[in-house]
Amino acid sequence: MGASRKFSDQVYARVAAIPVGRVTTYGRIAHSMGCLHGARMVGWALRATPVELDLPCHRVVNRFGELSGGWYFGHPDVMRALLRDEGVPFAGEYQVDLPRCGWDPLEDGGLSATDGVNDFNGIAVNENGCCVKTSF
């Protein structure tokens, strides 16, 4: 399953905004788009990133700071080297020090979220391609 074009374009905009020396998570990107359960969709969008966009996808890690997308680069060592070259601190061999280098698109990027959901009762898809609550 892939992400919609509109959703992917919004993911790409957020990834492009991640500062050098910082990382963010799939979940933080999703949350900044109003998708409280959209981390996996963010991963699908990133997996299909057109090469010509030249996005810093290596700056996206999982919620624990682990280089979960590392195999996309051939081996997690490649992703780790890219991040180390940018000065990203590590807490383990394949885990960044998320409290020290984490970046939140909502706090630092001037981006805003739309309404999201935290359950699956009464939901629909909003203009961002994310699930939103339609009844309470």
Image: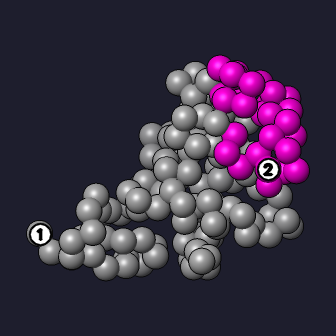
Q: Position of residue 51 (x, y in %)?
A: 85, 65
Q: CA distance from mark 2 to mark 1?
A: 41 Å
**Magenta highlight range:** 67-96
Q: Secondary structure at mark 2?
A: helix
Q: Residue at x 66, y 28 (%)?
A: 96
Provide the residue designation for mark 1.
136
Indicate left or right for 75 with 29 as reference: right
Q: Position of residue 97 (x, y in %)?
A: 61, 24
Residue 49, above or below 62: below
- Specify the quadrant of the image occupied by residue 87: top right
Provide the residue designation for mark 2.
71
Name the amino acid, label 1.
Phe
Q: Residue at x 63, y 66 (%)?
A: 44
- Indicate which disc residue 43 carries: none
Specify the farthest residue to the left. 136
- Specify the quadrant of the image occupied by residue 3: bottom right
Q: How many marks?
A: 2
The reply to whether residue 98 is in sight is yes
Q: Is residue 98 magenta?
A: no
Say which quadrant the N terminus sits in: bottom right
Q: Position of residue 79 (x, y in %)?
A: 81, 40
